[in-house]
Image: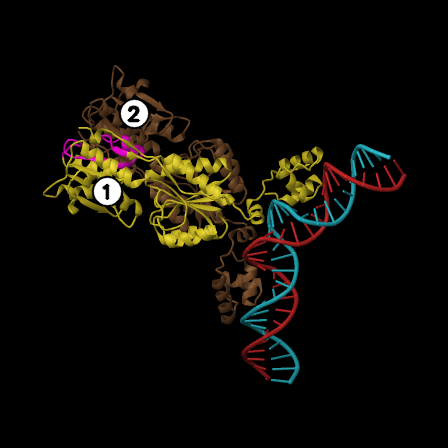
Chain colours: A yellow, B brown, C red, D cyan
Amino acid sequence: MANIQQVAQKAGVSVATVSRVLNKNTTVSPKTKLKVENAIRELNYEPSMLGRNLRNSESRLLLVLIPSISNPFYTEIINGIEDTAVSNNYNILLCDTDSNPQRENIYFNLIKNKLADGIISMDPAVNMQKLNELAATHSIIQCSEYDENGCIPYVTIDNELAAYRAVKHLIQSGHKKIALINSDEKFLYARQRRQGYEKALKEFHLPIFNEWMITSQQLGFEDGQQAMRKLLQLNEKPTAVFAVSDTLAIGALREINANQLKAPNDIAVVGFDNISFSNMTNPTLTTISQPMYKMGCVAANMLIDKIKGKDVSSVILDHELVIRESTLG
Amino acid sequence: MANIQQVAQKAGVSVATVSRVLNKNTTVSPKTKLKVENAIRELNYEPSMLGRNLRNSESRLLLVLIPSISNPFYTEIINGIEDTAVSNNYNILLCDTDSNPQRENIYFNLIKNKLADGIISMDPAVNMQKLNELAATHSIIQCSEYDENGCIPYVTIDNELAAYRAVKHLIQSGHKKIALINSDEKFLYARQRRQGYEKALKEFHLPIFNEWMITSQQLGFEDGQQAMRKLLQLNEKPTAVFAVSDTLAIGALREINANQLKAPNDIAVVGFDNISFSNMTNPTLTTISQPMYKMGCVAANMLIDKIKGKDVSSVILDHELVIRESTLG
DNA sequence: GATGTAAATGTAATCGATTACATTATCTTT
DNA sequence: AAAGATAATGTAATCGATTACATTTACATC
């Protein structure tokens, strides 16, 4: 692969002139410009980003941290981030942390090493302290999950309100025994959604039973199945379930089917996220729709602004309750 | 962020010595080594990959091209690639081409520009000619989808045999009217799976009807729904369907349910890929299981070998028919 | 034709690392 | 204590671009 020197030599000009042509600098005569362009074409030259980035100390790469690529919730967000990034001449590095601190470190180093210009973190299990430290010197945005006490700008939805609405919908459909399948409350969204759940129950003077609140360590389908299995073993079974993630809800639905029960008649189910699967289940799943694509766009724009040195402030986007078969008796 | 010069100054040594400490070169006395390490710690120094990569002309970044991050089929493969890459000290750049030639170009430039050391392409819609040209000068591996006539090493399964087995299973379950929901036959895997389908039908002297072969442009759930809708409008309806992707099959199942029909009694369904969701549907989906994680590992190892200059040859992995409720009358 | 000004082009420093080669320090050995 | 061998460290070129500053060229004006 040719370098800028060879192009300059072939065109009979200096490297500076070649660079000017490359960067669309106007102070190049049309004649020399043509010579240079011919040389570039003949040599099949492509400028090395390594050299360019070293000099400009930018990489035009954005890091996107996700806990697991297997959760469809993130895919739509990523589409939004990617579209926005590309149209601003950035590319994204998708980093599956697996909620593994060691991997996390690898990716943090990438930004310290100037191989990335900024980070969008969607990992709820990220080391918040480290992230905050890093944010002092680098551009970082949080998406969906964030640190209440930190100073990193974020984009998210009102989780408590969304959960409240989901549970209220169940109550208004006539349910009085409503279970919660939550994820670990070390995550902010889990605490917020539980608050929304409790708020709705209290408002309608319904009892809050610890037995009906299951904590799941992971968000896989199987985890939802397991949680539902526990609920079905109780003496006093709930008639409705609110799961804090569609993947959990879908697993729960599966377990209901497997026990020859029917949703929503035996047990109604509400999920959270509106992943594309949620409309393919049998019955289809009632869920809270997050504006995932938009969330990705907003996060990317915030990050790019931050990199440019602008001030950015956090954003809370709207959500929507999507009512489908799993709660429609 | 401190650079190597400042570390050298602080430690009272030359940059060469710092570099030696960094690269675990043995010819450094324990005493100086300590001095340097202290300086590094005090200055919070992290070596710039940009400088290092420019000098070494390597980036230790692998490009992974996928047509769409929304298809769960790819997620398990990516997990395999990522694990293998990380344990070999590489990181991966996940690139969602959206089967968009312009995006594709962006990512091809990344490797030309030395920002990536190699490519694993899983995009069936990739420009094969360009990919082959690029392969002449760069390290490239294809995964799952490949070019029969090209010279790029690949890892895949025997698509024809897998499809043959899937259809044979339907025939042996008593079905005589078997439809195919295929994707565009510009893709090799589509042609191969169709061949397997036809081979099975011929072997059992069953007729091949063009009406029963639907081509879907995309692999989304909705596309499967649409395809099934067409099949259900036929005068002579099939009693079983083989879809070349689980996403299509799940959409088809959904459409069957929506028409108050039951799988497998009214119509049996077989998918392809064994994505995790295929075990969550109602009924659960019979499908061909590809060793996705392993495929990713093999592809990554092949690529790393190729980068090292070793000779690598293509690999065909085993598949498995997973029988579930959607074909079990 | 001399002069001034603007446009075009070139020279060389720079980004932050690695490393071949040169030099200096240390240790043996007699 | 001198010589030679070896270990430790330093000097400076290098990777491939960008760009401030310097220089050259072209052209207008009197």
- Which chain is mark 1 on? A
Residue A145, by quadrant, is top left
For badge 2, the amino acid type reads: Gln
Residue A278 among those drawn in magenta: yes
Residue A252: percent from the left, percent from the top?
Answer: 21, 38
Mark 2 burial class by Cα count in 10 Å: few <14, some 14-19, many 20+: many
**What element does badge 1 sit on?**
helix
Q: Is residue A81 visible?
A: yes
Residue B144 visible in the current orientation: no
Q: Chain of mark 2?
A: B
Please, which residue is most extreme toward the top here?
Answer: B235
Q: Image height check: is B175 above or below A266?
A: above
Q: Which residues are magenta?
A: A260-287
- Neighbour class for label 1 at 10 Å: few (<14), some, many (≥20)? many
Q: Secondary structure at mark 2?
A: helix
Residue on which the image places disc 1: A222
Q: Amino acid at mark 1?
A: Glu
Name the residue beneath numbered marker 2.
Answer: B225
Asked if residue A191 lies left or right of residue A64, the reply is left
In the rendering, at what x and y percent does residue D10 appear?
61, 66
- Point out the image quarter for the C terminus of chain B: top left
